[in-house]
Amino acid sequence: MNKDKLKIGIYELTGCAGCALLILDCEMELIDIFNAADIQSFLMAKSDNIDGELDIALVEGSVTTEKEIEELKDIRERAKVVVAFGLCASVGGIQARFGNKEWKENYKKIYGDIEMTHTKSVQSQPIDAYIDVDLYLPGCPVGKEQFLHFFTRALKGAPPEKYPRPVCVTCKYNENDCLLNKGIPCLGPLTADGCGSVCPNHNLPCQGCWGPAEGANPTSEFFLLKEKGFDIEAIKKRMSNYSGTKLAEFFEQFKKESK
Amino acid sequence: MKKISVDHLARVEGNGGISATIDGKIVSDVKFSIYEGPRLIEKLTIGRTPEEDVSMSPRICAICSVSHKNAVLRAIENALDVKISQKSYLLRNLMHMGEFIESHSLHTFYLALPDFLGFPNAIAMASKFEFEVKIALEMKHFGNHIMKTLNGRYIHGENAVIGGFGKYPYREELLQIKAKAIHFMPFVFKTVTLFCGIDYPDCPDSPTLYACCEPGDNKFGFWGDEILLSTGKTVHRD
Ligand code: SF4
Ligand code: SF4
Ligand code: SF4
């Protein structure tokens, strides 16, 4: 392998494998991707994997077992840059809606007294609950364009583009009729952009699958939604589907601001 | 006697390992471990609107997300007594075929074939089998293109909704899909020839139970209310 090539490792913790699959879904770019970088580890795609020093580790999935905590810490030690790859890694994914107590109760309701044999289950959390994370690429799954931009910039040593806007901004660029005006609860105002407003482009409300938008103004948006007659509790519930453990922080900010 | 242990299975979807003892031709103590962490999805769907459940359910697995989507749509439409039009039915079927084309291209060429041909991954195969690798990528892309056209995105698209679709594809888009499908036919036959020519290792016979759905109308398909088993038994959905 060429020494000058970026050493990249792609790892999967608990998720649906969609973010890792998304890399394989770059069919027209895949050969170039494998040639441009030294892909050291990618279990889904190759069998000659090496667990050595890395320039970049892309970590998909949230942490839901003790074994994964160990794996994650090992990855952190080996990698210069760790990227939370996708919604699960960034905010904990759909499986991170429950707090610790609820997690345990629900685990019992589903699995009864059956424990995992090789490890213990822990409440689902994003990877930054256990290690320092350098970059976040949210999305369920990560957007293909977003990934390719990230990858090509990384090859040149440049940081990734930021998407500090909510979905609504792109939705307006795309000249969609706003669904809120039709009484349809759309989470675009609160959700991070990156998908190209694909759901509103199909006349469908955003379900929030990119997680909370950094640059959103939740206070203002909640008042707007209230004014338009939407049930705030239903919106919060909806928002919690894809916001994992970061939702609490989001609402803290909301509470502070609305005082 | 030899003990083998693979901690992380590669080129499969999901996390697992396998260990076994091999004594000449006798294989024993086979242990297959699945390392997937729990996600409690059963609980996540409770207390949400049907629309939110439809959105979350495909996240069970991305490889077969459209199958999950069709399943959850069928279940909810059945529960709420929602009927879909023949057009929506056909388009959902097409969406499902997109997943088949994408997923089977992935599994055959990218996940399985490198083992038979002695390569660590599919891209490395390109040095000797450039045409096959490239056309397999194109077929996979075609499958994804169908899913995107119908469901809005490659993975976890939201366009298929309770009652039909958010937005219906244009006739032109569907005709293009048809033309592309015809274009790939010769390669599909080549794929069959290729895989039939592989020297598969002998495996001990074990009784395998096969199951499929009866789509009705004496047609080929993947969903229906009757589950047909290879024992000759039929099980109804309920
Ligand atoms: S973020 Fe979404 S697509 Fe990615 S692994 Fe998690 S559930 Fe799957
Ligand atoms: S449809 Fe949704 S995403 Fe688009 S502008 Fe309205 S609220 Fe924002
Ligand atoms: S519009 Fe919302 S739900 Fe749809 S893909 Fe984008 S972020 Fe996800």
Image (spheres, coloured by chain):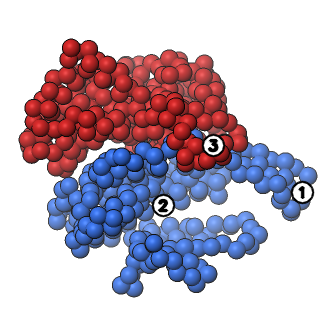
Chain colours: A red, B blue
Alpha carbon separation for disc pair 1 and 2: 34 Å
Which residue is identified by label 3?
B35
What residue is drawn where x is 66% and y is 46%?
A114
Q: Secondary structure at mark 3?
A: loop
Amino acid type of the residue tagged 1 in the rendering:
Asp
Nearest-to-viewer mark from 2 and 3: 3
What residue is drawn where x is 55% and y is 36%?
A104
Amino acid type of the residue tagged 2 in the rendering:
His
Q: Which disc number belongs to residue B104?
A: 2
Task: Report if residue B71 is visible in the image.
Answer: yes
Alpha carbon separation for disc pair 3 and 1: 27 Å
Circles 1 and 2: CB atoms closer than 8 Å = no
Mark 3 Cα shell of 10 Å, populated few (<14), some (14-19), many (≥20): many
Percent across and percent down for residue B49 are 30, 49
Q: Is residue B88 left or right of residue A124?
A: left
Mark 1 and mark 2 lie on one chain; the one further toward the N terminus is 1
Which residue is identified by label 1?
B23
Viewport quadrant of the N terminus of chain A: top right
Alpha carbon separation for disc pair 2 and 3: 24 Å
Amino acid type of the residue tagged 3 in the rendering:
Tyr
Mark 2 and mark 3 lie on one chain; the one further toward the N terminus is 3
Mark 2 Cα shell of 10 Å, populated few (<14), some (14-19), many (≥20): some
